[in-house]
Amino acid sequence: MKDFIIPWDDDRDMGTPAKTGRPVTLTIDGVEVTVPEGTSVMRASAMAGIPVPKLCATDSLDAFGSCRLCVVEIEGRRGTPASCTTPVHSGMVVHTQSSKVRKIRKGVMELYISDHPLDCLTCAANGDCELQDMAGMVGLRDVRYQAPEQAPLANHFEPRDTSGQANVEWLPKDESNPYFTYDPSKCIVCSRCVRACEEVQGTFALTIQGRGFDSRVSPGMAGDDFLSSDCVSCGACVQACPTATLQEKSVIELGTPERSVITTCAYCGVGCSFKAELNGDQLVRMVPYKHGQANRGHSCVKGRFAYGYANHKDRVLNPMIRDHIDEPWREVSWDEALGFAATKMRALQETHGRRAIGVITSSRCTNEETYLVQKLARAVFHNNNTDTCARVCHSPTGYGLGQTFGTSAGTQDFDSVEKTDVVIVIGANPTDAHPVFGSRLKKRLRQGAKLIVIDPRRIDLVKSAHVEAAHHLALRPGTNVAVVSALAHVIVTEGLMDEAYIRERCDWDEFQSYAEFISDARHSPEATEMLTGVPADELRAAARLFATGGNGAIYYGLGVTEHSQGSTTVIGIANLAMLTGNVGREGVGVNPLRGQNNVQGSCDMGSFPHELPGYRHLKNDDVRAVFEGAWGVELDPEPGLRINNMLDAAVDGTFKGLYCQGEDILQSDPDTKHVAAGLAAMDCVIVHDLFLNETANYAHVFLPGSTFLEKDGTFTNAERRINRVRRVMAPRNGYADWEVTQLLANAMGANWHYTHPGQIMDEIAATTPSFANVSYEMLEEKGSVQWPCNEAHPDGTPLMHVDGFVRGKGRFIVTEYVATDEKTGPRFPLLLTTGRILSQYNVGAQTRRTDNVVWHDQDVLEIHPHDAEVRGIEDGDWVKLASRSGDTALRAKITDRVSPGVVYTTFHHPDTQANVITTDFSDWATNCPEYKVTAVQVSASNGPTEWQESYAAQAARSRRILPAAE
């Protein structure tokens, strides 16, 4: 018997998915092997080191059994069954290389090759073609099928027959998609692409059209190509294709890659693992890594294809400085730029005090880089003026979950969704913003789990291919707390709570106080219906489903946190989970879907002005002592300024300098005019980024950044998973971002001497209890790990609060609804809410510089047909969107996705600057802006507003760069 341990980096295709079950022992070609019950003969054979030829089988898809290339003989069984669809049983004896099966395989392969072009030497898949490999594996040396005399051989690959007549079976290559081609002439109709679209992605965009010899892959309806179809360009079909039928255009252009580096995607908070495949230092393609524990071999259009921004012509590779923001930039050396920045920042502290400058850390940079930036503020600037983009997205998550559970992060891993029975998705749009997780969720829903969507907009999960929500609570923007409280009211008043769980795991006295509060009739669905717009019967049914439907999981996003009561809603969600006993095991939990690749890590690393790494308050002497000992400096015990406080203080004249790494606050933060005023009032703004972003319009120093492909480090995703980022190529700007921060710190008098990010992680582990056991060596061994990872949890913690809450007893907190100060009225009768779209990411700095603009080249305003009709607006018209803060113009998209009285737009394009509309109202606990509720008016327009034209002119002046000689 052979004992098989497959390391995490074993990338073999085992043919069919892995199974779990009792051990079963069988014999394959004389080798005894033990595998879990339910395993296919094909997979068992592969585990024994005996590969079986295959074409329609791959281990990311369920067995299909159509190609007949994997047939085997089994003693005691008639015929030659397909090994991919045949499960093992104890004592089975299998022969994979008998003369009978070899003859069958060769005959099958001859049939495939007879209708396939033999252009292997010039084919883009040469050296990476499973058909080519299998032909060699079965020993095919010639093809017996020949055209009859004076007649052509029917085929799909020759445009014309031997007489010169057009071949009606031939179809031209579809090159409509910007990233891959579809060549029908090379299709073997294995159905792997169709099955990947169904089983992995869940879009159902592809089908097999026709029967028999006329079968071919079709992207949607007749007349559709891949671009116009429902295809979301996730790449699952390309990944599954065994030939060059579906092929990346980058491979066609650059050739088959020769080496690969495993790294982590730098887009959303899912944290997908990828193999960056290269020729030399030329990146050819990004392939989702099958052992990535967050994505399990899947990807989306952004991570799979939208990496071209790294080489975009807009990328700035040389440092630049200027004395005033109305001057053109001057390219200078690194030494001059860093010296200029350090001199200015030191002078500002000497003139205005040490608290007159600060930093903003980046949720796109690594943990190590973020750690150094907050250390720069505390150990070099000697203040706590440090904040991060989580301030404007998930800071209420940190507060709300910290207060109720005792830790500021989600409770589950993404695998947990496979065990859930009822899912609440509130204020999130996973299929657009977190598409890989969205695909996993859809798969579970197709298996029978129930879904409750709480969102003012009809997102795709409400109803799409083979997925339909049991309940859609289309609430009025700004009423999240009222809806969540009404759900809790039903659960408590109808006795549906898990009393045993509450008595054991939660503070019973606090629960009784909460139960008395939530049982009040003013929280009932009937009492809140007029306020929320959610029918009482629908809400009651949703509450009963969640409380009684089995394992209940809650997933939420920025539609929860970006409100004036964002923290209150997070607390309410935690209350719901504790009420129903849905914390502490698989298939349940409270799961914030983080927006950026390392927004969780930026919070973990102490980016907030009141917390040191590991969410420890700096007012505590013992906590400060740890870092004072490690850093050799005395720390300021006074919390610093949040981003909005920095801008307010700048306008007031007391905050004068900012180092902003990898964030574009002028585009991403609310009330654009106020942000611009704050930046303009500063005497030294240092922007450290890839491109001259909107914030750089007001910068005095520009330090070129490096992409995720050009650095080593770690990201922490939404499930607390710490994943390695590995350097794929040398930094085009000369330095990784952590090196730039170190150079700036040393220019200001520090004596840092890190030589590798691994040393920074060692310092993080030495000072931060939740990271105590984390090291690069551990990550190389395990692939990834979820914090807390320390002596109590040496292998990490996939599930939180299993034996009890981190704070001890779970804490119920009353959630009183308080209406936002942002109200509609005669001047501004509509409510604007904002969000993201699949093809674009955050402020679009990366994705706008890729071919993703094919799908979304401008922000548009979604408006209900009724609201459009009364304003005389037609689809595609220019409209003016105005609020109390400002106005902008964009084109209208008339849709019933939004309710009457609600409009929706994205914020990916700076020429729209949607945040000129949003206000300065914010969450009561964390100052997270209220992006999701803005009273607006929509009216017909002739084009961009006066403000947009003025903004564009100022941006153009600001981006002038003097030639190097000048």
Image: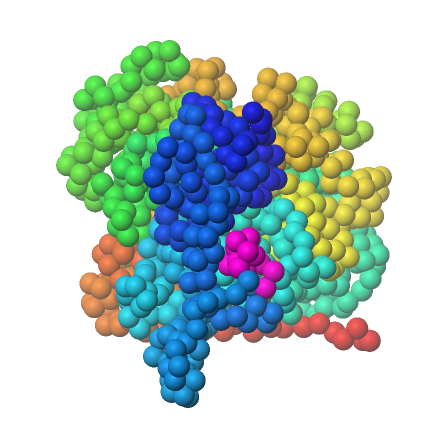
153 with respect to 456 (left or right): right
Q: In the image, what residue occupies the spot 22% across and 40% down?
A: 470
- Asked if one can make out residue 351 in the rendered structure from this viewpoint, the answer is no
Position of the N terminus, as image quadrant, is top right
Q: In the image, what residue occupies the spot 34% across and 15% down?
A: 501
x and y percent of residue 484 in the render?
29, 34
Colour scheme of the picture: rainbow
Q: In the image, what residue occupies the spot 29% across and 42% down?
A: 446
120 with respect to 775 (left or right): left
Question: Which residue ends up furthest to the bottom in the rendered image?
Answer: 164
Residue 469 position by quadrant: top left
Viewer-proximal residue among 205 and 768: 205
Residue 441 position by quadrant: top left
Q: Is residue 38 above or below residue 866?
A: above
Assess whether residue 130 is covered by the magenta stretch. yes
Q: Please give the range of residues in magenta.
A: 126-140
- Asked if one can make out residue 465 in the rendered structure from this viewpoint, the answer is yes
Q: How many circles with numbers are drawn on the protein?
A: 0
Residue 611 position by quadrant: top right
Q: In the image, what residue occupies the spot 31% across and 52% down?
A: 460
x and y percent of residue 899 in the render?
24, 54
